[in-house]
Image: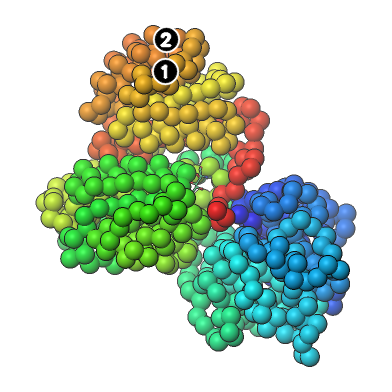
Amino acid sequence: MCGIIGITGRDDAVDGIVAGLQRLEYRGYDSAGIVVGGQELAYLKRAGKLSNLTAALEDEPTAGRIGIGHTRWATHGAPNDVNAHPHLDPSGRVAVVHNGIIENYQALRASLGDDVTFASETDTEVAAHLVARELAAQTTPDLLAAVRTVVAQLEGAFSLCFVAVDDPDTIVVAKHEAPLIVAHADGVGYCASDVAALIAHTRDVAALLDGQIARITPEGYEVVDVDGNAVEPHRYSVDWDLDAAEKQGYDHFMLKEIHEQPQAVADTLRDRLADGRLHLDELRSDEGEIARIDKVFILACGTSLHSGMVTKLAIEHWAGIPVEVEVASEFRYRDPILSEHTLVIAISQSGETSDTIAAANHARDQRAPVIALVNVVGSTLAREADGVLYTHAGPEVAVASTKAFTTQIVGGLLLGLYLAQQRGRMYSSEIGDILQRLQRIPAALEQVLELDPQVANLAERYQDAPYTMFIGRHTGLPIAYEGALKLKEISYLHAEAFPAGEMKHGPIALIEEGSLVVALAPAGHVFGKMVSNIQEVRARGAAVLAIGTEGSVSDLKAHADHVLTLPEAPHELAGPVLSVVPLQLFSYHVATARGEDVDQPRNLAKTVTVE
Ligand code: M6R
């Protein structure tokens, strides 16, 4: 939530900041702002999308060699011009942009006294006031020292980025439970919430760790802890390039990312088999430890949670370990029973979702080893986990997650097979055979993508359906949940998912003439049951759109109004990778038909770094 960028040491710093904000806008788009530093601070901020700020910049050109920018997902204070970042102290000598929440901001405001007035309702502004007060008390202005003193007083989760007239070439950033990376290239210093904002300048970055504070100048950066001791950030190189972060001719990032799924899945599967065995080297796992696992918890949010539901099926089926899948924000506030023999799998595209990170920490407090199944290399979850399995989906920009989901499912299948292998539950030859079959997924995905025109027609027809129900069983159920989430989040249409067998226990009462039911009925051991459930809703007047598989669709065609036919999946547990794609396309086409903003749906942000 909220994107931050800072640049020092470039004549066209403003252009660089605006370009960076464009890549960070997925993190929030309630307002955007920029402040240019130097001998005085000149700022401009506008409610609404970044385009409002860029239009204002054309009317009021702003230039400078140092500046910081922000794109906001509002938490404290309405999304208007005043609450937009940057925030300045009353004298206009210090400016700050912020991602996260300063929980004790009211107490801090009160500590400044009754005569201090605040321009905004935000939790952020107090940080500028406090740093300005510290600077005023110093004999030689030192922004880093001032920020260290202030950060020690803050509670909550935050990444903060400051500039000050008293230290005119310097940006100071502080990180605590919200992502922040720093970099230096060709005489320019950078910071940003996400590497996507810096990829045009460098691939070599350093992620700050919690409690670290950095001084960034055109000469380089130094990183210290809150006491001023030099510390090491997490340095790494990014393995994708600027092209991957562009739309490349597609109308929307979401559509581009849907079409990237064959490649993304191929990348996730690449180089996993050697000497007849499955290798997941990044897991850093100990065979004895895996043998002793007696329970698995999968923790995630949103789309990642749905992929976890498929992972549960894979682990239980192949490795024979009981698995619970839980919403991370619930897990962290209860008293789950864990031990060092409980394996926790935290799934997250970004690796920065605070609910998931906190849930993983909650598990680690009880000695449970944590594996992160993440996409973003170097992210907090990846760094903090005991082991990591990267999904290699490449950058996912659209708020609606697509290729991250399918690669997470594939990652989950790999984990299931790996646990089975390490526990001696399956022969290597069996695992090798399944892995060979999984290699067919990318080609099958290409075939599924050819359904696009058919799906677009259906979307046009049902674009105004007031309520859509998604039903499924076994591997179809997570996809039903995911299909409903996709439709809700980008088309704003009411959609819900139910286990098909649960319909008769209540939800079927909602069905009336003309209700739309999307039924996941791929080939598999519950196919017959699904056909019965389809008949039940159809008998009550529902229009049924069924997702089926070559070979069994003739049975479906007799009972459904529309059937989308998938190629046969290489394994029943891999079926969800294929069956979700028509639902991604359906939500995409419904949203575009309704004129909605597909890549930046209202009220949402790509990475949710607040509770
Ligand atoms: O980065 P994460 O995978 O941890 O994000 C979790 C959810 O916020 C995310 O999957 C969200 O539900 C998607 N935007 C839905 O498309």
Which residue position holds label 2?
A: 540
Q: Quadrant of residue 418?
A: bottom left
Q: What percent of the width, then of the height, locates residue 468?
A: 50, 23
Is residue 422 or residue 61 the one in the foreground? 422
Callout 2: few (<14), some (14-19), or many (20+) C-alpha neighbours within 10 Å? some
Mark 2–mark 1 CB contact (< 8 Å): yes
Q: What percent of the width, then of the height, locates residue 595?
A: 66, 30
User: In terms of secondary structure, where does tag 2 sit?
Assistant: loop
Relative to 431, 71 lies left or right = right
Q: Residue at x 26, y 44 (%)?
A: 314
Which residue position holds label 1?
A: 508
User: In terms of secondary structure, where does tag 1 sit?
Assistant: helix
Q: How many marks?
A: 2
Q: Earlier in the sequence, mark 2 or mark 1?
A: 1
State whether residue 321 is above or below residue 183: above
Q: Amino acid at mark 2?
A: Arg
Q: Nearer the viewer, mark 2 or mark 1?
A: 1
Q: Residue at x 56, y 45 (%)?
A: 399
